[in-house]
């Protein structure tokens, strides 16, 4: 689990990347993930969506284990972690959380969801 300093450093790196003209969409334009889900429908997930919505990948859905009653965000369906109706359409899950990503990975494994998992944090540092 990341601490507050890690989250700050990652967010700072994201902003530095943007100031240098390096965008998250660049990552998705060069990798084979064409249909993705964003895990996390809170602020970071929404920011991720805004930055990659015009990339070469399609955002199929948002996934969030505590999104009960939250059925749509930006016109994209929001599904609960244990809803499997859209998983067959997804190439990868992008975990937008900068803090509790280890818990998210554990939750996905417990639900027997074995799709490629990509941490937003790793994308930011790869650019």
Image (cartoon, grey):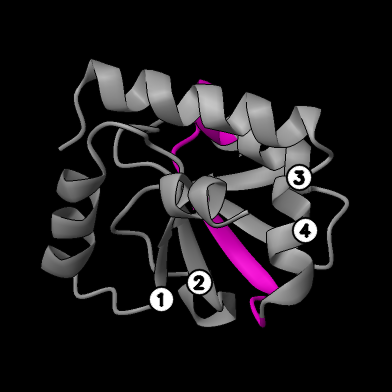
The residue at which mark 4 appears reads as: 26
- Expressed as whole percent of the image width and height from the top left, the position of residue 10 reads 44, 31
- Front label number (4 vs 2): 4
User: Closer to the camera, 114 or 101?
Assistant: 101
Q: Are marks 1 and 2 in contact (CB under 8 Å)?
A: yes
Mark 3 or mark 2: whose residue is earlier in sequence: 3
- Expressed as whole percent of the image width and height from the top left, the position of residue 62 reads 54, 47
| Picture quadrant of residue 3 | top left
The residue at which mark 1 appears reads as: 116
- Asked if residue 35 is positioned above or below residue 16 in the image, the reply reads below
Query: For the residues marked 3 and 4, what is the alpha-carbon distance in whole angstroms?
Result: 5 Å
| Left or right of 10, for residue 6 | left
In magenta segment, residue 19: no
- Expressed as whole percent of the image width and height from the top left, the position of residue 118 reads 43, 62
The residue at which mark 3 appears reads as: 23
In this view, which residue lies farthest toward the right?
54
- Asked if residue 109 is positioned above or below residue 55 in the image, the reply reads below
Mark 4 or mark 2: whose residue is earlier in sequence: 4
Mark 3 or mark 1: whose residue is earlier in sequence: 3
Number of marks drawn: 4
Examine the rendering and report whether any part of residue 102 can be seen: yes
Q: Find residue 92 and name its label.
A: 2
* Magenta segment boundaries in residue numbering: 32-45
Mark 3 neighbour class, 10 Å CA radius: few under 14, some 14 to 19, many 20 or more: some
Mark 2 neighbour class, 10 Å CA radius: few under 14, some 14 to 19, many 20 or more: some
Q: Are marks 3 and 1 in contact (CB under 8 Å)?
A: no
Secondary structure state at the residue bearing disc 2: strand
- Expressed as whole percent of the image width and height from the top left, the position of residue 68 reads 37, 32
- Asked if residue 75 is positioned above or below residue 59 in the image, the reply reads above
- Residue under the point 27% across and 31% down: 99
Examine the rendering and report whether any part of residue 75 can be seen: no
Query: For the residues marked 1 and 2, what is the alpha-carbon distance in whole angstroms?
Result: 5 Å
């Amino acid at each position: 689990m990341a601490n507050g300093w890690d989250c700050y450093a990652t967010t700072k790196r994201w902003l530095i990347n943007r100031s240098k003209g390096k965008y998250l969409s660049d990552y998705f334009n060069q990798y084979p993930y064409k249909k993705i889900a964003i895990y996390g429908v809170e602020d970071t997930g929404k920011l991720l969506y805004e930055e990659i919505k015009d990339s070469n990948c399609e955002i199929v859905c948002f996934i969030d284990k505590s999104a009960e009653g939250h059925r749509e965000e930006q016109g994209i369906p929001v599904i609960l972690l244990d809803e499997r109706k859209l998983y067959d359409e997804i190439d990868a899950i992008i975990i937008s959380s900068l803090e509790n990503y280890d818990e998210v990975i554990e939750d996905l494994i417990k639900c027997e969801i074995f799709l490629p998992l990509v941490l937003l944090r790793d994308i930011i540092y790869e650019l």
